[in-house]
Image: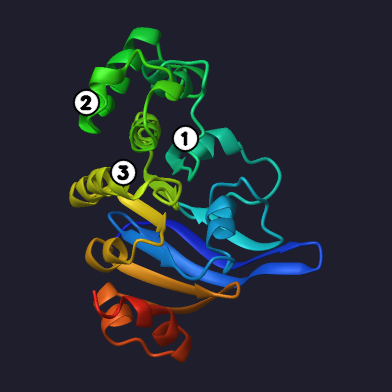
């Protein structure tokens, strides 16, 4: 039986009177690559921010290995070291080099020695093809390169799950492929991933499970061949219609 890492139960989130998420339920098992798709404003990024505790859910539970991490007394930094996040806008430290960006979390959160952190960071910078740029500052590299550094930084924390919040949407088209290639390689290696994306080909071809969100609820979910090949809900059909010719 698959090992359940995360379980989202009856999760809701409101900002004032605006309810952004309503009664969200799903689980993330070891090795899953779950793509969350849907129109802008459907609650996808808010859901991911709740899972990473960057937003506090209004109600519901987030279970990490059966323990509810929503509520008082939770060490959010320790939890995030297991459930890493790659942001749309990279969120690199501009005053640090590429290598330092990939070391700082290991030193501050995981309490690693500097040399151990450096060796581990280099391992992942090599993996994402960014080893030649270790002394560069973020302003000196392209958007695609920044995002590959951000992925290496997240991986260097040895997370169990990696969350991606629209990791290619801030990139020029020619840079999207280099980031998706890294993500596909991680998926092939068995990395557990939860990906909010507008890249339908990635969702269709790389995911093990697809969640379609509409107006703050999960409208339809299932294996990619079912969601893309035989959607059951009219909203899903309408959303996917523009990708059918691909």
Residue sitting at 42 percent across and 16 percent down? 97
22 on left or right of 156: right
Q: Nearer the viewer, residue 78 or 203?
A: 203
Category of crowding for the residue at label 3, using alpha-carbon neighbours closer than 10 angstroms: few (below 14), some (14–19), many (at least 20) = some
Q: Residue 36: name its quadrant.
A: bottom left
Would you name the residue on which mark 3 appears? Answer: 175
Would you name the residue on which mark 1 appears? Answer: 81
Q: Mark yes or no: residue 13 visible.
A: yes
66 on left or right of 135: right
Q: Nearer the viewer, residue 62 or 144?
A: 144
Would you name the residue on which mark 2 appears? Answer: 126
The first of marks 2 and 3 along the sequence is: 2
221 on left or right of 47: left
Category of crowding for the residue at label 1, using alpha-carbon neighbours closer than 10 angstroms: few (below 14), some (14–19), many (at least 20) = many
Please determine whether, in this image, residue 30 is positioned above or below residue 241: above
Q: Position of residue 55 (x, y in %)?
A: 65, 50
The first of marks 1 and 3 along the sequence is: 1
């Amino acid at each position: 039986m698959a090992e359940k890492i995360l379980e989202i139960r009856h999760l809701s989130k409101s900002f004032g009177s605006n309810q952004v998420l309503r009664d969200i339920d799903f689980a993330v098992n070891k090795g899953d690559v779950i793509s969350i798709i849907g129109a802008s404003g459907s609650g996808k990024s808010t859901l991911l921010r709740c899972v990473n505790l960057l937003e506090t859910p209004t109600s519901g539970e987030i279970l990490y290995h059966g323990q509810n991490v929503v509520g008082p007394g939770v060490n959010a930094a320790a939890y995030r070291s297991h459930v890493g996040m790659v942001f749309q806008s990279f969120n690199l430290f501009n005053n640090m080099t590429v290598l330092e960006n990939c070391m700082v979390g290991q030193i501050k959160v995981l309490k690693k020695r500097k040399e151990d952190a450096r060796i581990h960071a280099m391992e992942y910078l090599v993996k994402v093809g960014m080893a030649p740029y270790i002394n560069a500052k973020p302003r000196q590299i392209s958007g695609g390169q920044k995002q590959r550094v951000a992925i290496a930084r997240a991986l260097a924390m040895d997370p169990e799950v990696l969350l991606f919040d629209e990791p290619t949407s801030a990139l020029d088209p020619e840079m999207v492929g280099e980031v998706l290639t890294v993500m596909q390689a991680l998926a092939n290696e068995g990395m557990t991933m939860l990906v909010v994306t507008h890249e339908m080909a990635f969702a269709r071809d790389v995911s093990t499970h697809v969640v379609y969100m509409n107006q703050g609820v999960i409208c339809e979910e299932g294996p990619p061949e079912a969601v893309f090949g035989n959607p059951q809900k009219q909203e899903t059909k309408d959303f996917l219609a523009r990708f059918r010719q691909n």
